[in-house]
Image (tube, helix red, strand yellow):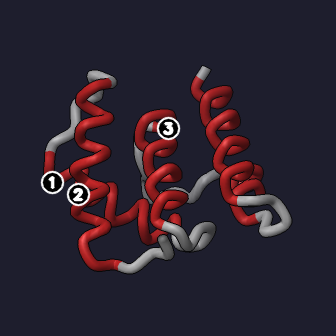
Amino acid sequence: VLFRSGDFEHRLIGHLGRLLEDAKVPAGEGELASQVHVGIERGLRYFRKENDLARYCEIVLLKLGGWTDQDHPQPAVQMLQSKAVAPDVRLRNFERWATLRRA
């Protein structure tokens, strides 16, 4: 489904809240809502479908601890922007990068 603002942000907050809870990652409701808002805004630079935006947000929150005022490092931005690569592959590569970066 192509991204349409509507209730996507609300549904994503609920989805990510459950994932964070399952992963034992503390997140206040206000902080999570703020992070999801930033995540959608930044994710729209790379993706247009809700499932891709949701996956991007999952990776950043669970693997990188969320968004800051800094953008992703240049290698990650280039990986995410590469329109020659399918979105699911870009997301797999980004997740791999995020996992290695945190290790």
Q: Amino acid at mark 3?
A: Leu
Q: Are marks 3 and 2 in contact (CB under 8 Å)?
A: no
Q: Earlier in the sequence, mark 3 or mark 2?
A: 2
Residue 1: x percent and y percent? Answer: 48, 70
Q: Alpha-carbon distance for marks 2 and 1? A: 5 Å
Residue 23: image location, x then y, percent: 33, 24
Kindly tell me whether residue 73 is visible in this rendering: no
Q: CA distance from mark 3 to mark 2?
A: 17 Å
Please state which amino acid type lies under the numbered disc 2: Ala
The amino acid at mark 1 is: Gly
Near mark 3 (Cα within 10 A), the count class, few <14, some 14-19 or many ≥20, is: some
Residue at x 64%, y 30% (from the top left corner): 101
Q: Which residue is mark 2?
A: 33
User: Which residue: 52% across, 52% down?
Assistant: 56
Question: Considering the image in quadrants, where does the C terminus appear?
Answer: top right
Q: Which mark is residue 47?
A: none
Whether residue 36 is visible, yes or no, is: yes
Q: What residue is pinned by disc 3?
A: 64
Residue at image mark 1: 30
What residue is at 22 percent from the left and 50 percent from the top? Answer: 14
What residue sits 43% from the left and 35% below the top? 62
For this orientation, the residue located farthest to the left is: 29
